[in-house]
Amino acid sequence: MEHSILFTIQEEVNLVAEAIKSVLELEVIIYDQNHVVVAATGGGQHAVVGEQVRGHIIKEVLKTDQPIYNLNPGFHDACKSCVLYKNCAEKADVSYPLKHEGKNVGVISLTAFTKEQKAEFERKHDILSNYLDKMADLISSKINAESLLKKYLSMSQTLQVAIRSMNEGIIAADHNGRILEVNRSAKHILHIRRDEVLQLNLLDMMPDLPKVLFTGKGFTDRDYSFIINGEKINVFGSAIPLEHNEHIIGVVLSFKDQLEVQKFAYSITSEVDDSNFDIIVGKSKALLETKAIAKQVSATDSTVLFLGESGTGKELFARAVHNNSHRADKPFRAINCAAIPEALLESELFGYSEGAFTGARKKGKPGKFELANGGTIFLDEIGDMPLHLQVKILRVLQERKVERIGANESVDIDVRVLAATNKNLEKMVKDGEFREDLYYRLHVIPVHIPPLRERIGDVPVLLHYFVNHYMEITEKEIKGFSPDALELLSSYHWPGNIRELQNTVEYAINMASEQWVTCDNLPARLREVNESEEEQELTLSEMEEKMIKKALDKYGDTLDGKKKVAETLGINIATLYRKINKFEINRNMQM
Ligand SMILES: Nc1ncnc2c1ncn2[C@@H]1O[C@H](COP(=O)(O)OP(=O)(O)OP(=O)(O)O)[C@@H](O)[C@H]1O
């Protein structure tokens, strides 16, 4: 049987029945659409609540949607099928349809059981219709209110579940700052306990709130802060004022932890960076020593200055240091101070606040220092930093605070600084082009990265590494370099260092049509250098001999010279002696 809506407001239906009885002095029974008694006056004498009745007249009313005034009960057409046809105990009755949203939901029935009541019934006949109409409306509006309340409760329940399960912090407060609702995430972000919430007032916690409540102007997607128990907590989100009848009655705040937002932005805007010390290729003593120092300093939070020519791998080292440090899962932000126009460099580094410049993004923007918060910033080409910004950088390094352009308060930051330059900073300091105080701040741990020409022994290892790398990318099957190509690559002086070598291999692999890369596949500039030299076919071992001779010419065949040769060629001193013996190099050896 369909659930009867009248039973959901049974209490109100009872009151209506009693009200009708007290005015009309007639017994009242109210049925639902299944002819079940919902309310009955007369203490159950004429009808029992919850029981279904035969109700021939009731059925007729529900079917025709018209009231029936019956002064001769038992003789109505509808009574013909009733067992009490022409023998009904009732003296008179009226049955009136109850409607809700256009549908019949029940019937109000008034019955006279005595002659007196019937007389009363006849006397008040005129007002009955009007009165019952009003009572039917009253019941209908109760049903409306009930279903509205139900809808509202279920909506509010859904909303509460949604708000509670949101990752964003949500706080709702009235216009006095009294907190009405706080979700779990808000408590977590603001480090407040459930029992603390009631003692807090949002006006004391959020410096920007009075303005929002006073002006009625909220904001969306911007940085703001809370101050709770003396602790400042920076968040990112919105404040939406609540209005009623043109009055501000409260506010809803939604927010996320600022660091989390930055971390998320970093994770979706940065490529996966797995640079570590293992991918820094090379076996020369010089490189191995540099790697050892860099690994050692990874563990600390000290500032490191990488010194070396362009393309030697300074950024690669910086990334490896970061990824090998306790900050590895935090952002690494690199900024090339030489590549960014001077006018933009300041805002790139320090960011700007809302409305700092006309035409600037309205909401303001964090700079690299803020974006690197918790992690590492890499200031590449620091030697190209203009003097006026050097002062600002120095302040950040000293105070560990960043002030956005146009802001009047600074933000605490926890950033490890790594810097690099290919310039002679010491000379720049002497020439007044670089601030001495900044130089000493950066120069805490200097790490020299040797140029490739001083570790020529790394060339074959790097070639092998990059051949594999580009073979994978181009899906070509390359076995290696022909001896003459290898000789050419090993004798080249590599002014562009590893970057140049990397580009050379990429070019060569693309050009190669055979399994071996030949001289013809190498960039013209390398061949041109070699063309000045005598054309000759060399075997691998001849090439080795030639490289050793060349290095001995350069460093001399003293013990120190040989040590240097071995280091440059990436072999140990014993191997060098073995090879010298093998090639019977006729030299005046000093042991
Ligand atoms: N030892 C190495 N092993 C493998 N790849 C290397 C090595 N050193 C450098 N590279 C690669 O060479 C290229 C240049 O390196 P990187 O950008 O780190 O040099 P840099 O010294 O920072 O250059 P610049 O001063 O011009 O910014 C990068 O692609 C890097 O991955």
Image (cartoon, helix red, strand yellow):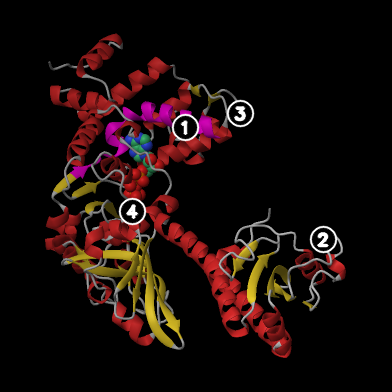
Answer few, some or many: residues within 10 Å of disc 3's Cα (few below 14, many 20 plus, some between 14 and 19). some
Residue 359 pos. (x, y %):
44, 79
Look at mark 1 in the image and give the residue it sits on: 469
> Type of residue at label 4?
Ala
Question: Amino acid type of disc 1?
Answer: His
Magenta region: which residues? 447-473
Q: Secondary structure at mark 2?
A: loop
Q: Residue 157 vs residue 211: left or right?
A: right
Q: Are marks 1 and 2 in contact (CB under 8 Å)?
A: no
Residue at the spot of label 3: 513
Is 503 covered by the magenta stretch? no
**Magenta stretch encompasses residue 463:** yes
Image location (x, y in percent) of residue 5: 62, 64
Picture quadrant where residue 120 is located:
bottom right
352 or 549: nearer the viewer: 352
Secondary structure found at label 1: helix
Estimate the spatial distance between the alpha carbons at disc 2 and disc 4, rounded to whole Å: 94 Å
Say which label, 2 or 4, has the lower sequence index. Answer: 2
x then y, percent, for residue 271: 43, 47
Depth check, front residue: 431 or 120: 120
Observer-side mark, 2 or 4, equals: 2
Against 294, is 361 above or below?
below
